[in-house]
Amino acid sequence: MEEKLVKMLIESKHLVALTGAGVSAESGIPTFRGKDGLWNKYSPEELANPQAFAKDPEKVWRWYAWRMEKVFGVEPNKAHYAFAELERMGILKCLITQNVDDLHERAGSRNVIHLHGSLRVVKCTSCENSFEVQEPPKVPPLPTCDKCGSLLRPGVVWFGEMLPPDVLERAMREVEKADVIIVAGTSAVVQPAASLPLIVKRNGGVIIEINPDETPLTAIADYSLRIKAGEMMESLVEPVKKALS
């Protein structure tokens, strides 16, 4: 099967990838529902929503500062580097991620679409000001905008918020063109991301799912591989490199 997949990647006209939390978990990033004693009494839905931020912005910011510290301190893994290598070789045209870390970029990926925003970005709640940060804010005090003085917020999409239309449109354009999509480390339940592979399938394309667990996508995937993304992607990229060298 591996030879068949390698051939498929090499011959693909427009390969895209969709990655989820399972890919970042291999770098040691705590999952949303991590076991840290400070935060395990809260569910993500309690903290990652506009209502919680309006009610207690300091509590929400302290949680995000903790998450940012964890994320900024880990390194990309084999999966991140493999996707970056496929892009460098001109095979992977676009990488769409549900993750809010920057591990794909740090591994070398350039054409990355962050569906759910990024922990590296902080934005103003009032004006259009947004910028990247290299370290988490120290909370308290609450971080404020240097242009208008309003409260800043994490640059991520919260529960109950719509995805930025331009980001979703970019992702849709990519999957509409795709003849092969690799879906790695995602539970395939969060919308609208979960619908993107279905568009590829509808257009006659191939779905390659890489996940240790079955997901709702498994039943329609052309290939469903019960393995971690890092191991599988590494085993595919090496023979692709040899074939193209």
Image (cartoon, rainbow, N blue to C red):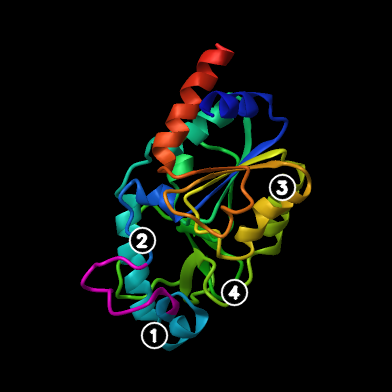
Distance from disc 3 to disc 2, alpha carbons, whole Å, reads 28 Å
Of helix, strand and loop, which one carries label 2? loop
The amino acid marked with disc number 3 is Val
The amino acid marked with disc number 4 is Glu
Distance from disc 1 to disc 2, alpha carbons, whole Å, reads 23 Å
Disc 3 residue crowd, few under 14, some 14–19, many 20+, Cα 10 Å: many
Residue nearer the viewer, 220 or 55: 220
List the residue tagged with mark 2. 31
Q: What's the residue at 52%, 57% (across, down)?
A: 215
List the residue tagged with mark 3. 200
Q: Which of the two discs, 1 and 4, sits closer to the camera?
A: 4
- Residue 110 percent location from the top left of the image: 56, 38
Distance from disc 1 to disc 3, alpha carbons, whole Å, reads 42 Å
The amino acid marked with disc number 2 is Thr
- Residue 3 percent location from the top left of the image: 55, 23
Q: What's the residue at 63%, 43% (across, down)?
A: 222
